[in-house]
Image: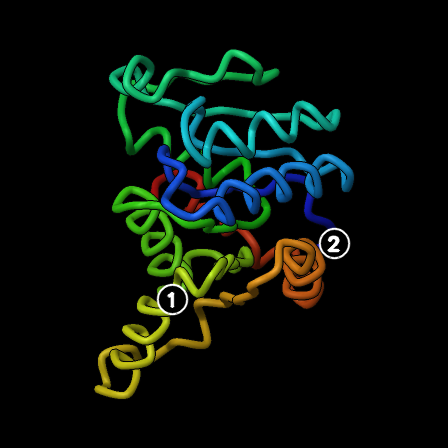
Amino acid sequence: MSTIKAICVYCGSATGRDPAFIQAARELGRVMAENDIRLIYGGGALGLMGAVAESVVKHGGKVTGIIPKFLIEKELGYGGADELIVTDNMHERKQLMFERADAFVALPGGIGTLEELVEQLTWAQLGRHKKPILLANILNFWEPLLETISHMVEQGFVHSASNMNFVVCDKVSDIVPKLRAAAAGIPEVLAEPPEVVERM
């Protein structure tokens, strides 16, 4: 992969209890805009989701929100996005998010964020894509998951951990450089196999 033009950000529709979480979301939005990287995200206006989207727009960046019909009222579809796609269901939403992104970042979030992240890790482990995945370990938020993955590896349940191609950082300023470094060694032909686009 030669460049990263769009990043899919997974994060909570809540702000969390520590102000550092929303600060990280806002900082990531600014960094993406300054690097001319489009935000691909779940389309909501609440929590960290809304914060990162608003920050991208505030700093002159581009935002694509992808939200299923049933969540428009619950998560308040973000009207500031220059592109807001409404899908019929969650599967279609996640498929489009995958197709439009060159890399994935997981900020702190809840079960939905975890599910989206783990799905990408699973597809990567199975060799369905090689797009970089980054866990933004703000205040060690993802440490329990990292320990769980290590435990799975140690117990012999993860046989191709290297395929997951995920990186971890605790500073927002390191996110784009780390993703670019991870993407630099990936041949374009391997980043997104055609069959993946057809059906994940």
Q: Is residue 124 left or right of residue 35?
A: left
Residue 86 falls in which quadrant of the image? top left
Residue 195's place in the image compared with 129, above or below, is above
- How would you rate the neighbour count of disc 2 (Cα within 10 Å): few for under 14, some for 14-19, many for 20 or more? few
- Which image quadrant: the C terminus? top left
**What is the three-letter code of the residue carrying label 2?**
Ser
Q: Which corner quadrant of the image does residue 11 belong to? A: top left
Q: Secondary structure at mark 1?
A: helix
| In the image: residue 138, left or right of residue 174 | left
Label for residue 173?
A: none
Compared with residue 136, is residue 50 higher up or lower down, i.e. above or below?
A: above
Assign the N terminus to one quadrant of the image: bottom right
Residue 103 in the image, given as x and y percentages of width and height: 56, 50
Q: Residue at x 37, y 16 (%)?
A: 76
CB-based contact (under 8 Å), mark 1 and mark 2: no
Q: Which residue is mark 2?
A: 2
What is the three-letter code of the residue carrying label 1?
Answer: Gln
Q: CA distance from mark 1 to mark 2?
A: 22 Å
Residue 104, percent from left and from top: 51, 49
Secondary structure under badge 2? loop
Label 1 neighbour load within 10 Å: few <14, some 14-19, many 20+: some
Q: Position of residue 60 (x, y in %)?
A: 75, 25
Rendered location of residue 138, percent (x, y): 49, 58
Point 41% across, 32% down: residue: 47
